[in-house]
Image (tube, helix red, strand yellow):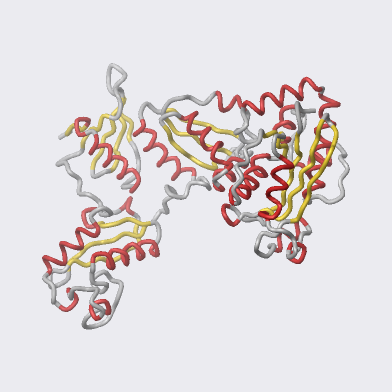
Amino acid sequence: MFEGDAVFVDIETNGGSGPRGRVIEVAAIKVAGGEIIDSFTSLVNPGSDIPYWITKLTGIHTSDITDAPYFEAIAAQLYEFMKDSIFVAHNVLFDYSFLKREFAAVGFDFKPKLFCTVKMSRALWQEHRGHSLEKIITRHNIPFTARHRAYDDAKAMYDFVKLTIAEKGQEAFLANIAMQLKTKSLPPHVDEAVILDLPESPGVYIFEDDAGAPLYVGKSVNIRTRVRSHFTNATTIAKELKMTLASHNVSYITTETEVEALLLESAKVKELQPVFNRQLRRATRQSIFLRDFDENGYETIRIENTNLAEYQNLENVYGVYTTKAQAKVRLEAAAKTFQLCPKLLGLEKGNGACFRYQLGLCKGACIGKESPELYNRRVELALERSKIESWPFQSEVAVRISETRSIIVDQWIVKSVVEHAFDEPITTAVEGGFDIDTYKIIRNYIRKNPGAVSLLH
């Protein structure tokens, strides 16, 4: 079956992800020469109750694990049982990532060779659709006693491998082992040919699910290397694991330069709204800091919910945030750090001195104790990094982003793209208004490449 020993492994978990994800049952069946020679199985106490939906799925109740050992109590025995063996599992990255994290927490560096029975099924049973363990068991009439219990699922995998060798041949099976060991970090549903087809150049890549829906949009100066890094990180980062296991394809769009990739990534995330992109998924409306002055000349800040794409007076925008709660937290932090007045920041109402002044945390701008000049200087210092920079040019500009392409920008808004690779330049208009992510990209690019900017009027 395998050259050397193998362990067929299955785990059940408490359904959590990241540090909250814990093993509640583990089973390992050791195989040598194609035959079962030993097994290990144990419930594991995760240190918390079992969620109802996990109990419904597995039949494991909180009462079942109350007296079960913690993972640290079985770690040494389980490690010895599995070391120097090929680690076999269905969706192997899932089981391996949980056990790797559990072992690491008690000081074991667990790095076995991996073999995935999902990948084997997809490669050697291409005539079938669907390669979940449930479908495989039903399709091949594999006997089992209790689905979603670790030992029975591990035994079903062993039976499936034996059946595959019998029907598809040892040579095909060994070839699949060799392929998997060479591409061990690839997810179960993505073919190696898809990854090899990815370019080693700048651009945007899109992870897609089995229906072609976008899961994640990213950018890189080397698309293939960056995509592979996602898969490598899947064994240690919960988000990467979820995305990897859900991915069935990776599409891409190449660009000439990194700044084009940055702009395209921002636009594609907003267009496609992929579930794993949170940072760039901007709502139509944002919570912004708007600067004004009161009758005594003190700067005031108020939080307003608006669509920046339709907003004209950007000079008074001193911060852009996804939610009002996020904006308020940032404003409260600025007030505390720079001793700003919460009344002037719109964080407190009422007459007279603010509460912070009574505590010695405000210098008294609210009651005229501090001059507007000194107070306003601290406001500017507190919010200088978050405020929208004034457009530094008297007109729209052309920004050269590659040898053959420029973008026309006015007030931080991309108006059009100009192609220079032809006898006559070709200009393509770009629709849309101000976008905070595009603003940051263009501002940083202009700062680093001032010679790329040409005034047009």
Above or below residue 219? Residue 303 is below
Q: Is residue 40 left or right of residue 402?
A: right
Q: Which of the pair 429/393 is nearer the observer?
A: 393
Above or below residue 200? Residue 22 is below
Residue 84, position in %: x, y? 70, 34
Q: Residue, x 44% and y 40% (percent of image)?
A: 268
Q: For the C terminus, which image quadrant?
A: top left
Above or below residue 448? Residue 335 is below
User: Which residue of the protein is positioned furthest toward the bottom in this rendering?
Assistant: 351
Q: Residue, x 43% and y 33% (percent of image)?
A: 220
User: Image quarter for residue 19?
Assistant: bottom right
Residue 439, position in %: x, y? 30, 45
Q: Is residue 259 left or right of residue 377?
A: right
Q: Residue, x 41% and y 30% (percent of image)?
A: 221
User: Image quarter for residue 429?
Assistant: top left
Q: Residue, x 33% and y 62% (percent of image)?
A: 330
Q: Which of the pair 330/403 is nearer the observer?
A: 330
Residue 244, position in %: x, y? 59, 40
Residue 342, position in %: x, y? 27, 72
